[in-house]
Image: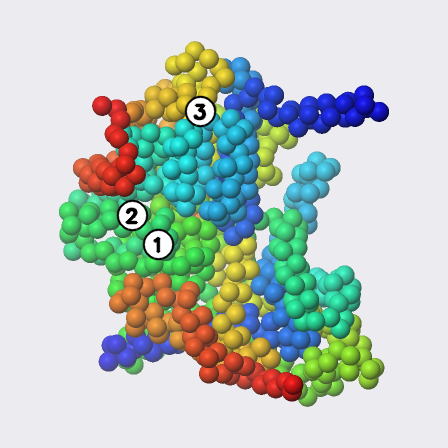
Amino acid sequence: MQQLLYLTEVSLNGLTTGVLYALVALGYVLIFKSSGVFNYAQGVMVLFAALTLVGLQRGQVPFAHLWTAVFGTHTYLFGWNLPAVVAIVMTLGVMVLLAILVERLVLKHLINQHPIVLFMATIGLAYFLEGFGDLMWGSDVKRLDIGLPVGISETIESFTAATFGYGVFVDRLDLFAGLVAAALVFALTVWLKHSQLGRTLRAVADDHQAALSVGISLRLVWVLVWSTAGFVALVAGVMWGAKSGVQFSLSLIALKALPVLMLGGFTSIRGAIVGGLIIGVGEKLFDFLMGPIIGGATESWFAYVLALVFLMFRPQGLYGEKIIERV
Amino acid sequence: MKIARMTICALMLAAFSAPAAYADLVLPWLEYRTGPYSPSGIPTADGFEDYLTLINERDGGVGGELIRVVKCETGYNTAKGVECYEQTKGEGALVYQPLSTGITYQLIPKVTADQIPLHSMGYGRTAAADGTVFEYVFNFPANYWDGASIAVNHILDLNGGNIEGKKISLVYHNSAYGKEPIRTLEKLAEKHGYTLSLYPVDAPGQEQKSQWLDIRREQPDYVLLWGWGVMNAAAVTEAANIRFPMENFIGVWWSGSENDVLPVGDRAHGYKALALHNVGSDFPLFDDLRKHVIDTGKFAGDGTSVGSVLYNRGMYGALLAVEAIRTAQEIHGVSDITPQMMRDGMEALVITEEKMAELGLPNFGPSFAVSCENHGGPGTGWVSQWDAHNQTWSIISDLITPDKEIIDGLIAEASAQYAEEQNIARRCQ
């Protein structure tokens, strides 16, 4: 019985962790689904969004080190502390601005190019954004505090303790992230499936040239998609940043999103969520069952092995579109 | 035309040879101001550079010779670190401090062949404390195995000297660095009768839910942390999540900076970490630093990390290098020393409380003397504790001496194995 309870606890925590992985994967799916570009910079966008949120909230002077080096200003703070909602809205504004700049400076010049060219451009963008974020907000570890619930859910713990004799651990932040992710997925699915704009986005993804020929503004679509991905990056940045602070390592959570994408498929929002949940539960259960035998630390590779095995049987992922090319 | 060409060539030659013409004391710094570990690399580098700037600005260098810091960015990448070593060693490097266990391991055979000292203060290959085998490698004043023993001795102090039947868990970075204390902790477990359980965490270590769910089920009495970078803050967060008592959670000195606790907020209150040196900026030296370096705008970073744990670490490393240079100059009677002379200076280095007070850092670090046999120093350290309300670290213990009986035995065993593998003849006979 005790072992079964432990297993349930591990699975529950796997599910909540999986939602966090899915949040990162969602950003990739959105851009890929809507424009056919695999955005390598999505992980860095998560970091950049979180850095901007914290910087704006605590009144940090952007590029303070640069101004100090050039003009000797030594002014690092404006001296305000913005309410979280205001800082979030302003950060969204910055992410939209970033989307416009990406479209103007990078994507506009690559219309009708092969997907690999667009992919390479996003690699460059990732490196640029990494350094730009550092220069703009500094590379020190920042605390993200926008009043999110943290710590063990005492309600679940006391309920399970009273019912089963063992208090199950669930992190309140993970539960909150689950709710946010559910709302996000619902809104995005409705938007993409049932709105005219959503259909427009899908048309662009299918064929740039055909979309242009029927009067769709490719540039507007790209700005829209990148802005939405920026919003998703902000949500992911907030959830992960609240766990261990906002620092460079945030960009590395993209590594956790890749197996999720392979598993769920690159073009499905539902796939990102299901893939995230499978990876989350899978890696936690594997570590719980096999960790003691093989020495632990299995989480970093298990997701990739699972995705690899999956690829052998279903290369397009669980919900991905099967690509049939006629010769 | 010919004269013009010759003039251009002469000017270019002069321009490119300018650094070599410097009769400076060259101290390379393999830094990491970029990448995931930059939040730790930056304050350490700032402390190192600021102290040397102070020595140049206030004292005109050491023995009349200015110090020149040659920097190379490694991004905490071992391959890049080795590349940096190869790039900078020709500049007349006196001693390397790579601030990375991975890079240190790779450099040991190289510095030995090139006869350039390597100082890995509180990190690197622990067996290098045996000077009879590792001629050019130093790791004073303490190493990882000392750290493990200091943590256990602190737990012994808390329990009246008896920890039989207690459960101690180690959450560690799944790398050469993180695995270093395991053998020592196992040996100490045999001696003191506690149970040791191990929880490896793969880099970068943001996700540790599995490990902490296990810890919550196992309910150890104490948890030790051997982490680096984001792994530390993630571990403290997860410990707070499962309501593990922070006063029973002890990190090594690489898991005890402001970066590791600030993101966790008030919930990190009471977390402990080992300290290689004292904390804060309440020392006379900082008045000089402000006067000659900070206020004059000659500081290396943005000046905000002055007095932080890692800033002090970098500063302490620079101080020990400067004192070794001074010792080498005294031994050889010349001011412009060579790396081999620097090695002699490091091997004859004596740090006393009087000297530290004279340098403006009373009660900042342990007193010790390096010798031909002992390159590791006394191995002593303190325990510090985080006050989340005032956002300060405080030293809460006396200087703790590690279990030398066990540590020395382990070092002798490991260095003998290395000597055999590398076919090294013992020295100091």
Read off the residue under disc 2.
Answer: B181
Instruction: State whether discs 2 and 3 lie on one chain.
Output: yes
Few, some or many C-alpha atoms within 10 Å of disc 3 (few <14, some 14-19, many ≥20)?
many
CA gap between label 3 and label 1 equals 35 Å
The Cα–Cα distance between marks 2 and 3, rounded to whole angstroms, is 31 Å
| Secondary structure of residue under mark 3 | helix
Instruction: Please report contact status of discs 1 and 2: CB closer than 8 Å, yes or no.
Output: yes
Describe residue A204's horizontal placement relative to residue A84 as left or right: right
Does mark 1 fall on the same chain as mark 3? Answer: yes
Estimate the x, y position of residue A153 in percent, counting from the top left. Answer: 41, 71
Q: Is residue A8 above or below residue B384?
A: below
Which residue is drawn at the image coordinates 15% and 50% (left, top)?
A: B190
Q: Residue at x 55, y 32 (%)?
A: B70
In terms of depth relative to the viewer, which is nearer, B280 or A33?
A33
Q: Which mark is residue B180?
A: none
Q: Is residue A194 visible?
A: yes
Image coordinates of residue B320 in percent, x first then y, are 42, 27
- Between B284 and B254, the one lying in front of the other is B254
Q: Quadrant of the N terminus of chain A?
A: bottom left
| Mark closer to the chain start, 2 or 3 | 2
> Can you see residue B381?
no
Q: Chain of mark 1?
A: B
Question: Identity of the amino acid at label 3?
Answer: Pro
Residue named by callout 1: B172
Q: Which sits in the foreground, A51 or B245?
A: A51
Q: Which residue is mark 3?
A: B339
Q: Are marks 2 and 3 in contact (CB under 8 Å)?
A: no
Query: Which element carries disc 2, helix, strand or loop?
Result: loop
Disc 1 residue type (three-letter) = Tyr
Residue displayed at 72% across by 23% down = B10
The total of numbered circles placed on residues is: 3
